Image (cartoon, coloured by chain):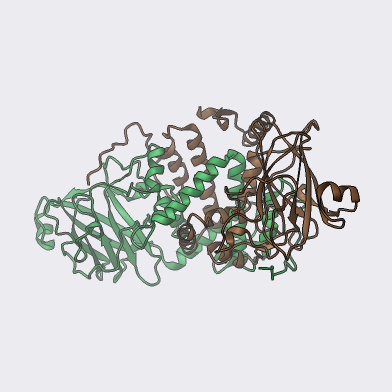
Chain colours: A green, B brown
Amino acid sequence: MPPTTPPTGLPPMKDLTTENITENVHIVNSQCPSPRLKYLLHQIVSHLHEFCLETRLSTEEWSYGIKFLTEIGQISDDLRHEFILLSDTLGVSSLVDAINHPRQPPATEGTVLGPFHTHDAVDMSHGAVLHTDPDATPLFVLASIKDTAGNPIPDVKVDVWEGDSKGFYDVQNPNREGPDGRGVLRSDEDGLFWFQAIVPVPYPIPMDGPVGKMLKALGRHPNRPGHVHFMLDKPGWDLLITALYPRGDPYESSDPVFGVKESLVVDLSTVEDEEMAKKYGVKVGTKLLKHDFVLLSEEEARELRKKNAIEAMEKQGRKVVFHDDLPVPADDS
Amino acid sequence: MPPTTPPTGLPPMKDLTTENITENVHIVNSQCPSPRLKYLLHQIVSHLHEFCLETRLSTEEWSYGIKFLTEIGQISDDLRHEFILLSDTLGVSSLVDAINHPRQPPATEGTVLGPFHTHDAVDMSHGAVLHTDPDATPLFVLASIKDTAGNPIPDVKVDVWEGDSKGFYDVQNPNREGPDGRGVLRSDEDGLFWFQAIVPVPYPIPMDGPVGKMLKALGRHPNRPGHVHFMLDKPGWDLLITALYPRGDPYESSDPVFGVKESLVVDLSTVEDEEMAKKYGVKVGTKLLKHDFVLLSEEEARELRKKNAIEAMEKQGRKVVFHDDLPVPADDS
């Protein structure tokens, strides 16, 4: 097929040597109509080339990398997201969450969504039992949701999910008939919600694919410390996807997906108060997780993202303009 | 499944905040038993995180990237290597070749292998006709192979391949019955080889996959300038994979895979000498490509790679040790 698209208007590349490949890629990409995409590609290409140059990447290593990435794509399907697992195990997912949902005290920090959230969890009333697992240690969860000024936030949609006493989520059960270990509540007029969960246990991430091979080669273990997931959602407030990790888990300081943050490690106590036990319909002696969540408003989060973006650009010695709230260097606008 | 591998001996991560994710990933990866793999991962993680931080990568962009990479894996098969195409179009393949086969004058520069090399090309004698394409403009190729001191190198295996007058390689023909447009020669005792090819024409790289979508979004055209491929192989000499590009192609300065280098752009002349025409069995007036290839010895190439690796490490302020001829920082050894 003869070529049909002449490269009109393209600035000619430099004099084409082994040394100026990076610069030439930037020139060829410089006609990208989207300033944001142009900036992303400029940085991707710079980092990829810098990586090859500083490591003197061998042809065999490059070839291995191509095969590794191809296998990750090929093992992926609607239920298995191996590229997300790669992103998780390299700390990228956690970082992207932190960038997009920045928090400053007293706001609650977020963490990775993970692969086990579903959209079929049913509405439940306060105090409902999340799990039907008879082998589990019951855990009563009592939580509040407030704004940064300390005011309660009512009517927040609270999506909660966790694995069972063996470390499995319901979706990992091949005979799953419906949701188990998950539910949706709404905070009451005092910003409170409560439910009966189980004390979470550690569990391994999938190790039978290319990412598992990578972790083995790196000498890493696959076990996530036990946790309960929370997604707090209300229009006008920055979405909070987070999890709480009971203190003392053996994998607390080596989470393979870097989801644990110090502020999300919690101390469990015990329901010792007869009045409380009666009020919430739980037994005295039940394990208790009390926690105060603090949400940023959308406006607070947007301002914080913008401030951080300007700082990140200044660190590169660049002035910034925003396209759809995302930064690009001003000299490209 | 309860976890079975305790993280014995792993240095505990830092105090686990949004700010120290990168450092924590490095700590978790620090027990990798291979110093080279540890170094590669350290640099990959640093660059990935730096990219996210400096661009403030949005959750939607991250998600698009995951989908893009997954699709590239899924469209790939034994005949289609979309990840190699991605590497080619971002200049990575060309860079990796330059790193692994460094050249200094007068040695001939290399370039990308491309996806159209096969292993079924047949041996041919000097002067043989490479192509059976009746629509093509014949091109007589007469070449020498020398070392850096100017001595001829005999008995080099010379693998040559090129597309037809429409820009197609034989492997792109669904009715392909055998090799066409490719062959294998051996340089004679004077280091010479010659054959009858065709004047190459430009052709587009595959645009029907995710990489094609990327090029369109970047405003890039798919057309490679016309070229003839050469692979020169002899034990004791650094493998030379290269191509020659007749000057004046409209895509000469905007090659989508960054294979063109100034030293590989050649001027065609014409067979004007009756004696030459008779000697090589071609007509007076035939287009002529004369070229002198210069090979580095394996030893020269190894020394050059080592010198470049030491310089690249020093640029990072690091001392270097070598494992299997590949560099790692000395403080990790």
Residue B303, by quadrant, is top right
Q: Position of residue A104 (x, y in %)?
A: 43, 55
Left/right of residue A78 with respect to residue A135 in the rendered view: right
Front residue of A197/A59: it is: A59
Left/right of residue A168 with respect to residue A67 in the rendered view: left
Residue at 61 percent of width and 64 percent of height:
B215
Front residue of B237/A125: it is: B237
Asked if residue A84 shows in the view, the reply is no
Please determine whether, in this image, residue B181 is positioned above or below residue B329: below
Left/right of residue A185 with respect to residue A279 in the rendered view: right
Residue at 78 percent of width and 55 percent of height:
B139
Left/right of residue A10 with respect to residue A281 in the rendered view: right
Front residue of A269/A219: it is: A219
Q: Where is residue B81 in the image (x, y as percent from the top left)?
A: 53, 55
Q: Where is residue A186 in the image (x, y as percent from the top left)?
A: 26, 69
Residue A81, by quadrant, is bottom left
Please determine whether, in this image, residue B320 is positioned above or below residue B171: above
Asked if residue B121 shows in the view, the reply is yes
Front residue of A133/A235: it is: A133
Please determine whether, in this image, residue A34 is positioned above or below residue A314: below
Q: Where is residue A40 in the image (x, y as percent from the top left)?
A: 58, 59
Count of numbered tags = 0
Residue at 33 percent of width and 57 percent of height:
A115
